[in-house]
Amino acid sequence: MARARVSLAVVKRLPKYYRYLGMIEQKGIIRVSSQELSSITGLTASQIRQDLNHFGGFGQQGYGYNVEELKSEIEKIMGINKSYKAIILGCGNIGKAIMNYRGFKSSGFNIVDVFDHGKKVGTKISDYEIKDIDKIEEYLKEKKPEIAVIALPTDVAQDVCDKLVDGGIKGIWNFASLDLKLPKNVVLENVHLDESLYTLTYYMNNLADYPGTKN
Amino acid sequence: MARARVSLAVVKRLPKYYRYLGMIEQKGIIRVSSQELSSITGLTASQIRQDLNHFGGFGQQGYGYNVEELKSEIEKIMGINKSYKAIILGCGNIGKAIMNYRGFKSSGFNIVDVFDHGKKVGTKISDYEIKDIDKIEEYLKEKKPEIAVIALPTDVAQDVCDKLVDGGIKGIWNFASLDLKLPKNVVLENVHLDESLYTLTYYMNNLADYPGTKN
DNA sequence: TAGATTGTTAATCGATTAACAATC
DNA sequence: TAGATTGTTAATCGATTAACAATC
């Protein structure tokens, strides 16, 4: 029987658990209770237990959770124990930042190729020879990457997205400022920097609404 | 009398309204109903009216909303009609991307200086002469920037954050992978790229939980 | 065994949706 | 005026918190 659907709120908290578990694991701590996790994460112990129980009983009554085991379970749940072939579309500021960013590799995120168009095609930027975005369809058929990073101008993003979907991409990490339209079997995760900045200025101007570090 | 506290969920939708209003304004459309906004944004008409009414009655019965006026009101609410002096801390991949990113200027976000330490100090990177992060305290006293962008390694971020807070910074846009501790009168907005990537891989591995383009 | 802490059910809280009276 | 659509109240839904029995 399929487990109950896990809400977005829970999914967004998993990386946080993972991060804190990594921190306390490095301190050499073996076991942790929901109460202790509560005090370091700022979430309630009740919420932590509820969240974890969506995926199974990882704890033990009277003991708590084994740090290493719990971390490893969350790693599996989030799918970061696997390896992913990723391509980057667009070699502007954001594309380059993602290209060069270390630390993603640990999560199995392997950038295999980078695409752009015009003059940049054929040039080499930090170890990647930039490929032609107009030839993306053939590339997808041949190499079958799972993840595509869209770091393109707004006006071309949807068009490229459509080709990615047709080519069988499984997940899109979108940095362009628009809501891409795609079938619901292709996963979309947005990083809307402008919206994030607007949230910041909103709270700077409406401090009474600011929930503190809850977001 | 102070208006009721606006929830984070509402605040996070404001930039979306703003973006779509900009799009339909460019098409030359003068008026729009909550029903029409619903069909292009994917939100319910009811929610849109509820959201907007937190800030006042911008619409007119039987007519709808004036596109230009509503956009301008939301602009004011989010505080992007104002100008902000911003500094960037850390000149790695992400720091550079933010430095070079166009389009932020339209939101009144002006990068006045960029800081790093070690060899980079004194060098020039895209029009900015990199300043020494160790002299940040004096700088803050003198120049009084409002926003600081933290694009630093995890291990030094909290230390620099403390100095920024002491120096009277009003808002922090944090790209480092940690939960910064700061007083609640200083606004924090996080961009946790690793958490975003983990959300993507989670849904790629748990497609049944994927809510579609609702996030 | 006694104490601790989970897993899970029930209660509460808050956000979304529905409905409709007000009014342009 | 009649039709349209808002502003706002009420109903529903879902997520968080509290409580406690199960059990290590």
Image (cartoon, coloured by chain):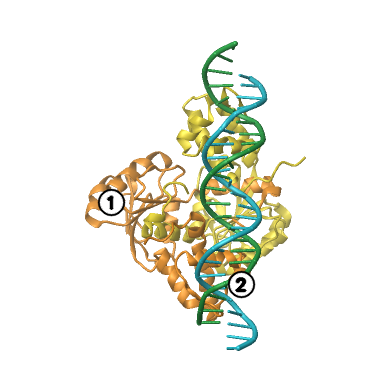
Chain colours: A yellow, B orange, C green, D cyan
Type of the residue with mark 2? Gln
Name the residue that disc number 1 marks.
Answer: B168
Residue B51: percent from left, percent from top: 51, 64
Name the residue that disc number 2 marks.
Answer: B35
Looking at the image, residue A156 lies above or below residue A183: below
Q: Secondary structure at mark 1?
A: loop
Q: Is residue B214 left or right of residue A102?
A: right
Q: Quadrant of residue A183?
A: bottom right
Q: Is residue B67 visible?
A: yes
Q: Nearer the viewer, residue B213 or A81?
A: B213
Residue B122: percent from left, percent from top: 29, 52
Q: Is residue B213 visible?
A: no
Q: Which residue lies at the image location 47% right of the left edge and 71% below the top edge?
A: B57
Report how many numbered discs are placed on residues in the image: 2
Residue A195: percent from left, percent from top: 48, 60
Label annotation for residue B154: none
Q: Which residue lies at the image location 48% right of the left edge and 55% below the top edge?
A: B7
Quarter of the picture holding the N terminus of chain A = top right
Q: Secondary structure at mark 2?
A: helix
Residue B204: percent from left, percent from top: 67, 48
Q: Is residue B160 left or right of residue A133?
A: left
Looking at the image, residue B211 lies above or below residue C24: above
